[in-house]
Amino acid sequence: MALGLTDRRSGYPLQMVVRGADAGWRVQETDVPYQPRTGRSKVTGTWRGTWQAVRDMRAVLAGPPATGPAAAVAGAAGAEGVAGAAR
């Protein structure tokens, strides 16, 4: 998967979905079983974590669409299963 992902914090999942959609991948949300969180969230449980998450996601959404070899390879692959929704 050559999507050219660069964000390694809170924007990573959003960047993966956006770049996949830009590359022409099908975006599909799939329910999965999970256990409730034990403990407090490091992201939304603090003001600092919330602010960093908002800043990371804003940067991803403000970025240019994926172009070049990474988008061409990803688009040609026709992969499915990227969770979430496109912008």
Image (cartoon, helix red, strand yellow):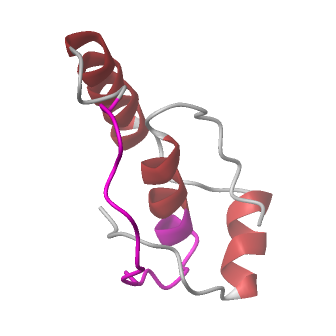
Rendered-image quadrant of the C terminus: bottom left
Which one is in front, 26 or 84? 84
* 28 shown above or below 59: below
- Main SS type for the magenta part? loop
The residue nearer to you, when weighing 10 against 79, is: 10
Residue in view at x 35 percent, y 19 percent? 52
Q: Looking at the image, which is closer to me, 25 or 69?
A: 25
Q: Which residues are magenta?
A: 20-41
Give the side of residue 53 with respect to residue 15, left or right. Answer: left
Identify the residue shown where x is 34% and y is 49%.
Answer: 37
Which percent across, then down, holds residue 79?
65, 85
Reply above or below: 52 against 81: above
Residue 39 in magenta?
yes
Q: Image quarter for residue 3?
A: bottom right
Q: Where does residue 2 sit, x and y in percent of width and height? A: 77, 61
The answer to which of 79 and 67 lies nearer the viewer is 79
Q: Residue at x 40, y 70 (%)?
A: 34
Q: Residue furthest top?
A: 48
Q: Is residue 23 magenta?
A: yes
- Which residue ends up furthest to the front in the rendered image? 38
- Residue 11 spot, x, y in % from top left: 45, 38
- Which quadrant would residue 81 be assigned to in this image? bottom right
Q: Quadrant of the N terminus?
A: bottom right
**In the figure, is residue 82 to the left or right of 79?**
left
Residue 33 sits in quarter:
bottom left
- State the residue at coordinates (37%, 26%): 42
Q: How many marks?
A: 0
Coordinates of residue 27 in the picture (x, y in percent)? 44, 80
